[in-house]
Image (cartoon, rainbow, N blue to C red):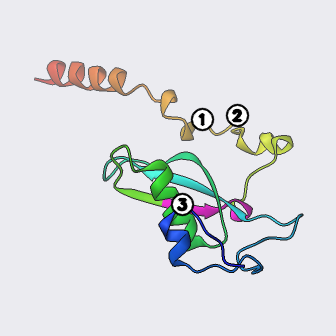
Amino acid sequence: MKIDSLDPRINRANLDGDSKQGELDPMDHFQTYEVFEQKKRGTHHIHVGSVHAPSSELAMMFAKEQYSRRGQCVNLWVVKTSEILATQYEDADIFETTASKHHRDPNSYKVMDRIKAFKERQKQNA
């Protein structure tokens, strides 16, 4: 039995109603991809959402249609959600700085105080 549709693209595909091509088993699903877009060249990519697709190429196409067709976009990244590596909240202590290493914190330097002291010494020596 041939599928008859109001959509001419479906009719051109000459799909057989008994065909299983493109169908998934009941518990299967397409992979999830995370989409990042860049609004202007040189700016950061920002996460804008997710798409489900059978391949990376189709995920890119879906992302382009879904997230960049209305607004300005110069670049898209599409990444499999399963490929993203993230830290666990229980490991938050890895981001804490060691108290004895103040030299790594720029706030511990008093640059203006040093500049003023240098200028005072220059005036006294002149």
For label 3, the crowd category at 10 Å Cα-Cα, with few meaning under 14, some 14 to 19 and many 20 or more, is: few
For label 1, the crowd category at 10 Å Cα-Cα, with few meaning under 14, some 14 to 19 and many 20 or more, is: few
Image position of 114 (left or right of 61):
left
Q: Position of residue 95 (x, y in %)?
A: 71, 42
To which residue does mark 1 refer? 102
Q: Nearer the viewer, residue 102 or 94?
A: 94
Q: Position of residue 71 (x, y in %)?
A: 36, 43
Q: Nearer the viewer, residue 95 or 125?
A: 95
* Disc 1 residue type (three-letter): His
* Disc 2 residue type (three-letter): Ala
Image position of 56 (left or right of 23):
left
* Gap in angstroms between the C-alphas marked 3 and 2: 69 Å
Residue 53 appears in the rendering: yes
Q: Position of residue 89 (x, y in %)?
A: 81, 41
The range drawn in magenta is 77-83
* Gap in angstroms between the C-alphas marked 2 and 1: 7 Å
- The N terminus: image quadrant: bottom right
For label 2, the crowd category at 10 Å Cα-Cα, with few meaning under 14, some 14 to 19 and many 20 or more, is: few
Residue 45 appears in the rendering: no
* Disc 3 residue type (three-letter): Leu
The first of marks 3 and 1 along the sequence is 3
Judging from the image, what secondary structure is the residue with disc 3 in? loop
To which residue does mark 2 refer? 99
- The C terminus: image quadrant: top left
Q: Which label is found at residue 75?
A: none
To which residue does mark 3 refer? 6
